[in-house]
Image (cartoon, coloured by chain):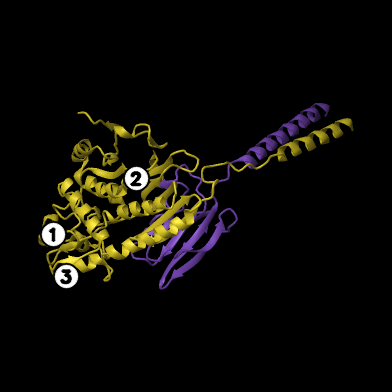
Chain colours: A yellow, B purple
Amino acid sequence: MKKVIAAAAAAALLFSAAGCSQMHPAASAQDAPAASTAGIFAMDTYIDLTAYGANAEAALDAAQSRILELERLWSVTDPGSEIYAVNHNGGAPTRVSTDTAEILAFALNMAKETNGALDPTLYPVLTAWGFTTAQYQIPDAETLSALLKNTGCEKVALNGQVVTLPAGMELDLGAVGKGYAADEAAQVLADYGVESALLDFGGNILAVGSRPDGTPWRVGIRDPDTDGTLGVLEVTNQSVVVSGGYERYFVGEDDERYWHILDPETGAPARSGLTQVAIISEESKLCDALSTAVFVMGREKATDLWRERQDFEMVLLTDDGTVCITEGLSGCFTLSSGQEGREVHILAAET
Amino acid sequence: MPRRRSLLFPAITALLLFIGIIGSLWALRPPASTQVEVVQNGITIYRLDLLREPDHTISVCYNDGCNLIEIQNHQIRILDADCPDQTCVHMGWLSENGLPIVCLPNRLVIRFTQSSGDTDALA
């Protein structure tokens, strides 16, 4: 009998001990303070904005307005946009706003600095592949050759706020628009005194300051093959823009992938040996422009450009799975678990 | 038999202790992200706790475009869509470290309400 009572008491004690646990929700950077968020569909993507601070909500409202204002100016498909007007003015000079003149000047300059790897005049070629209509097809060599005759930044004249584009040519700011808009949105937030924010323009990331707790923002780079991350960048006041063929492509009858980043020289998808490019720099439009250009250029030319400019860092994923990291990222980039099998090369500034 | 009885008691005690430890560990585990929101054209139309949702499908439409959302085994994805590029369907199940599921033509976004993954954003 004593044993039974002892057993029952022990069992009761054990059960109560097992139940004696408290849920302590883990404190995290996102838990406190509260974030203000806003999400909009614009610039052919979904834009997710998160900001912290007293004026965060008002700042995000103003930032959204600014983004939509820029979209109205630059949309290639909206007949009311300035870019549409430039593209359909039959070669006549067209007056544009300061914003449009500035982004155009920037794009044309980047085209020069990347020896044409970035080319904002490829819209008709993009259309021929079906990327603008989702009616995918492989244009023949003759078609591409004819279309390429109406491309080339050297044919675009920009004098102050007047653009002259030859008839048959079309400008497309898709490779720089999101980056430019992100920089503008960040400026609006700064004007409102916001010191901590994370702006996600469909994968183009702009980190304002640090996380509210002072630690750097953690921006993952997507692994194109799996659902996970290739690696994580710790950034403060930096933008991260990634480009890769895997983002938008179709599979042809030959089982080959045809993607939306075209080589301006051939008019066909750029195949430079790179699967993915991540550019890190303070200016989002620079990251945006370079991510496309570097994907077209390939590892060697990109490394030369990096050594020459010294105003950005990059992570390159080559077709054979090697990860190349510029040395300026040491300490800020960590390969994620599961990626240990990859070869890693550090690109040094001095040859 | 006295021998068997004396072994049984410690065995049951050990089992109860084991269950108690496991139970405590389970109760104390950090909560995985289970709160998701389905946002259409900027309006949150559903807020769901995946742990509590039974397996089922939801159809959401924006003008003439519809998406069929599936919840199964406490996961969520777009099972079917009538958008031309099917990007949203190819994104598969919503993952904590991944991007939100987005259907641009139908202005639909499915995402966790609170990020608990290792990163703040995915480029």
Task: Check chain identity for marks 3 and 1: say if they share one.
Answer: yes
Answer with mark 2 or mark 1, whichever residue precedes in sequence: 1
Instruction: Point out residue A197 in the picture as x, y percentages from the top left corner.
Output: 44, 48
Q: What secondary structure is found at the residue carrying circle 3? A: loop
Residue that numbered label 3 is attached to: A89
Instruction: Point out residue B61 in the picture as x, y percentages from the top left corner.
Output: 45, 69
Q: Left of A351 or right of it: where is B39?
A: right
Q: What secondary structure is found at the residue carrying circle 1? A: strand
| Rendering quarter of residue A89 | bottom left
Residue that numbered label 1 is attached to: A157
Protein chain holding label 1: A
Task: Check chain identity for marks 2 and 1: say if they share one.
Answer: yes
| Kind of residue at disc 2 | Val
Residue that numbered label 2 is attached to: A240
Identify the image quadrant of the N terminus of chain B. Answer: top right
Pick the residue in front: B56 or A219.
A219
Q: Left of A39 or right of it: where is A301?
A: left
Query: How far separated are the C-alphas under marks 3 and 2?
Result: 36 Å
Answer with mark 3 or mark 1, whichever residue precedes in sequence: 3
The image shows residue B84, relative to residue A176, as above or below, that is below
The image shows residue A222, relative to residue A136, as above or below, that is above
Hey, which residue is sitting farthest right in the picture? A1
On the question of residue B72 being in view, the answer is: no
Residue sitting at 37 percent across and 48 percent down? A206
Pick the residue in front: A65 or A140.
A65
